[in-house]
Image (cartoon, grey):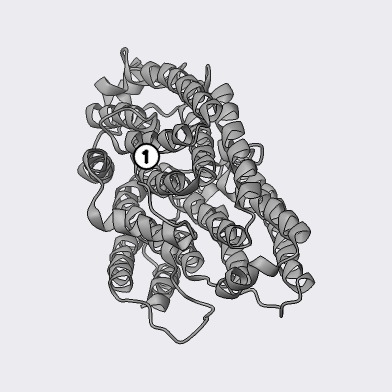
Amino acid sequence: MGLATIIIPLVGAAVALLLRSDMRRPFVLPFFALAHLVATIVALARPEPGGGPRWLALDAPGRIVLLLVSVLFAVCSVYAVAYLRLRKDRPNRIFCACLLAFLGMMSFITWANHLGLMWVAIETTTLSSAPLLYYNRSARSLEAAWKYLLVGSVGIALALLGSLCLGYSSLAGGHESSLLFEDLVREAPGFSKLWLHAAFILLLVGYGTKMGIAPMHTWKPDAYGEAPGLVGALLAGGMTSCAFLAIVRIFHVVVAAGEAAFASRILVFMGLFSMAVAGAFLVRQRDFKRMLAYSSVEHMGILVLALGLGPAGAFGALLHMVNNGLVKGVMFLSAGNIHRAFESKSTDEVSGAMRRLPVSGALFLAGFIAVTGSPPFAPFVSEFTILNAALGQGRYVVGGLMLVFLLVVFIGMGATVLAVVQGKPSGRARRTPFHDRPLTILPPLVLMACVTVFGLFVPPPLRAMIEDVVRFLGYPEVQP
């Protein structure tokens, strides 16, 4: 079923291109999303067959990312049906086809068991998702799409250079040239340390650009600010998770080489730096969709910080990746509803969202409480796990800085979110035709329910999958 999770969305993209009716085409999205979800569940339920190294294989972190991407896309596909009905002024052939191609390429990343193949898969996510940013056909959306392509191209070029350095570190160590991850991990202790260090830095910068960690985050505010809400949800919850998966796999090779301490220092620094940059830009932020972009920068920083904090940190990182993906879906979809109702993203023109859109406004507020790590929601559990990992290692400076940056982010986001949801809507906003509809509020409601449940307890299957990743990284024991 591995190939099915890649082929099904690509077949759906072809169907979307061939179908002539703009009214019927959006229903292709949930149909193929459901088929992809079924194929994903079947693939996860079946044990991986043996037979030696393969170019396509689903490793432990890939299993979690594939499930997250499939669930998030399925929910967003339902929202897309209602959204595209409201956008009858825009043809949706390219939009629907690119959405499904994007899903196929994200699935491709999770199955890629070869360093070069993974690089190709990540590059194709850029090409398939860039047209989605230009859906509104405005000058700002065109600028955002070009910036996304240009900055992403620089990042992926650095990742290619890093891949070459990693391959050369194997050759310099006297090994045969192989870029299969099983071979890289097995032969890592004999790699040239100098070339391995260079490879890790270049790959972190390259794939970190796709994640949007600072200072490689410059594409995010424009891309998230101009993209439709459902596209923002897939970028913030799906694509960034796939890029993080690439970094986890590279980190696995570095750990196997005995250089975990070197990589961990860099990851911790980059994580804290991203949180600091995000906090600085969130203070007095007036555009609530750009606010979500900087929130994503913060959470990508939390992920790489946690990965550098040993087994307990790695457990928290994978749990936080899932939690962040779900809560970003809540916030982007509800923000999209607010944007449609007020026809603006600025707090100068948007106020009283809870009066104008009671459900979407409440979800936006609840999403803010969740995404800033407040109990009883899921991000609180994962962030507490990460903080506990730092303090448990005696890294009090790291833990203290993390708390300070979380507080700055909470204050900065709180000012923007409260300005949006409180007060009275303007007369112009009350006259716009958009209102909460079942298909525009059900998807974020479902995601919010998951965020709440995961905050009360981590489902045993999810816990087992995350523990498998910690063991996959070569740590001697799991410390959730």
Residue 225 at x, y percent in the picture: 52, 36
The secondary element bearing badge 1 is classed as helix
Residue 60 visible somewhere in the drawing:
yes
| Left or right of residue 97: residue 418 | left
Q: Quadrant of residue 175?
A: bottom right
Q: Could you classify mark 1 by the number of other residues whose Cα lies within 10 Å: few (under 14), some (14-19), or many (20 or more)?
A: many
Q: Position of residue 184 (x, y in %)?
A: 62, 71
Taking 177 as reference, is 80 left or right?
A: left
Q: Is residue 10 above or below residue 338?
A: below
Image quarter for residue 1?
A: bottom left
Does residue 358 appear left or right of residue 131 in this picture? Answer: left
**Residue 345 spot, x, y in % from top left:** 46, 27
The mark total stands at 1
Horizontal side of 157 relative to 247 (left or right) equals right
Residue 47 in the image: x percent, y percent?
33, 76
Instruction: Tell which residue pokes out farthest to the bottom in this image.
Output: 51
The structure residue drawn at horizontal position 54% and vertical position 78%, both measured from the top left corner, is 55
Residue nearest the viewer, comparing 312 with 463: 312
Image quarter of residue 217: top right
Whether 57 is drawn above or below 456: the answer is below
Q: Which residue is mark 1?
A: 382
Going by the picture, which residue comes out furthest to the top?
423
Between residue 389 and residue 24, name the one nearer to us. 389
Examine the rendered structure and indicate whether residue 38 appears above or below residue 480.
below
Examine the rendered structure and indicate whether residue 46 appears above or below residue 361: below
User: Residue at the spot x=58%, y=27% of the render?
Assistant: 276
Q: Is residue 153 visible?
A: no
Name the kind of residue labelled 1 in the image.
Answer: Ser
